Amino acid sequence: MSVTARLEELGIELPPPPKPGGVYSPVVIVGNLAYVSGHGPLKSDKTLITGRVGADLDVQQGYDAARQTGLAILATLQRELGSLDRIVRVVKLLGLVRCTEDFGQQPAVINGCSELFRELWGEPNGMAARSALGSSALPGEIAVEIEGIFEIRP
């Protein structure tokens, strides 16, 4: 089943693709790899999920923010590639969680994005190499920022 069909089957709607907030390209394609710049948890109403996990947000709310960030990444990839069905595999994710200094469950938060991609591409193609790190600050006080590398077909 194609990823586009899988999104429809799951009733998942992508938010509008975010506009760059600086001097960078949202996606850079080199050979068969698409490098996606950091994205935040952009919702369909164009607002962002903000707050610090461990203070303003709990683990589940952080997880939901990471899932929403994954949807924003997919919106950008769809715009840039023309179709998400060009994506073969999720290769690497780097997730940053804006959190308190004593919060240590960053992997549980970033699972929101990882589990979304596994749900869409299955195993092993939806299972990326991954890092999940804590951060004291992120742009616009967003709760999560995630970047990724995707293998694509021409």
Image (cartoon, rainbow, N blue to C red):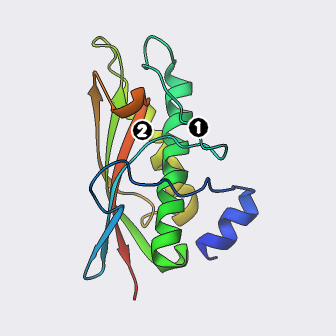
Q: Are marks 2 and 1 in contact (CB under 8 Å)?
A: no
Look at the image and tell me whether residue 115 can be seen.
yes
Q: Is residue 8 above or below residue 108?
A: below
Residue 132 is left or right of residue 124, and the answer is left
Q: Residue visible at 56% across and 26% down?
A: 61
Type of residue at label 1?
A: Thr
Q: Residue visible at 31% across and 50% down?
A: 22
Residue 21 is left or right of residue 7, and the answer is left
Q: Residue visible at 75% across and 56% down?
A: 11
Lower position in the chain sequence, tag 2 or tag 1:
1
Q: Is residue 92 above or below residue 38?
A: below
Q: Residue under label 1, please give it.
A: 47
Q: Position of residue 102 (x, y in %)?
A: 30, 11
The quarter in which the C terminus is drawn is bottom left
Look at the image and tell me whether residue 108 can be seen.
no
Q: Residue under label 2, please give it.
A: 110
Dot 1 falls on a residue whose secondary structure is loop
The quarter in which the N terminus is drawn is bottom right
Q: Quadrant of residue 144?
A: top left
Q: What number is the disc on residue 127?
A: none
Residue 5 is left or right of residue 3, and the answer is right
Mark in front: 2 vs 1: 1
Type of residue at label 2?
A: Ile
Q: Quadrant of residue 89?
A: bottom left
As measured in the structure, the alpha-carbon distance from the residue carrying label 2 to the one carrying label 1 is: 20 Å
Q: Position of residue 108 (x, y in %)?
A: 43, 31
